[in-house]
Image: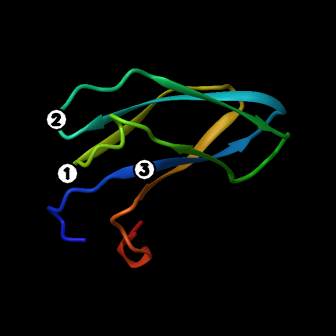
């Protein structure tokens, strides 16, 4: 996809490691272009002690999934015992070869 082409982010995934067991939460906000940050969203997930690379995948709904040229995400809260390793975004416009680290 060309660099200046709009894209639609339809999923976000957080990859975490856990040092404890039980129910954990992650809260995040998104921002499209130069707009305001969204209301914080909280996702609940279960982990087992010493789980590595647990993937929490979240489909995004409007208005978060509108087409944009710039998409930002920030984590606003994370349960203790959880370490955030990576954040992935998925877009219907991107092909696998478009993804870079």
Q: Which element type, helix, strand or loop, lies under badge 2?
A: loop
Up/down of 50 relative to 22, above or below: below
The numbered mark at residue 99 is none
Q: Quarter of the image holding residue 26? A: top right
Residue at 20 percent across and 56 percent down: it is: 6
Up/down of 99 relative to 58, above or below: below
Q: Nearer the viewer, mark 3 or mark 2?
A: 3
Residue at 72 percent across and 31 percent down: it is: 81
Q: Nearer the viewer, mark 1 or mark 3?
A: 3
| Mark toward the start of the polypeptide (3 vs 2) | 3
Identify residue for label 1. 69
User: Is 3 or 17 nearer to us in this picture?
Assistant: 3
Q: How many marks?
A: 3
Identify residue for label 2. 34
User: Is 48 or 46 nearer to us in this picture?
Assistant: 46
Identify residue for label 3. 10
Report the side of 8 relative to 70 (left or right).
right
């Amino acid at each position: 996809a060309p660099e200046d082409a709009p894209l639609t982010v339809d999923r976000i995934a957080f990859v975490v490691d856990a040092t404890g067991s039980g129910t954990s939460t992650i809260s995040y906000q998104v921002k499209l272009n130069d707009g305001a940050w969204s209301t914080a969203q909280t996702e609940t997930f279960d982990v087992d002690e010493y789980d590595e690379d647990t993937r929490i995948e979240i489909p995004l709904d409007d208005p978060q999934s509108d087409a944009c040229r710039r998409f930002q995400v920030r984590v606003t809260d994370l349960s203790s015992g959880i370490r955030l390793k990576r954040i992935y975004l998925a877009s219907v416009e991107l092909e696998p070869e478009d993804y870079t680290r």
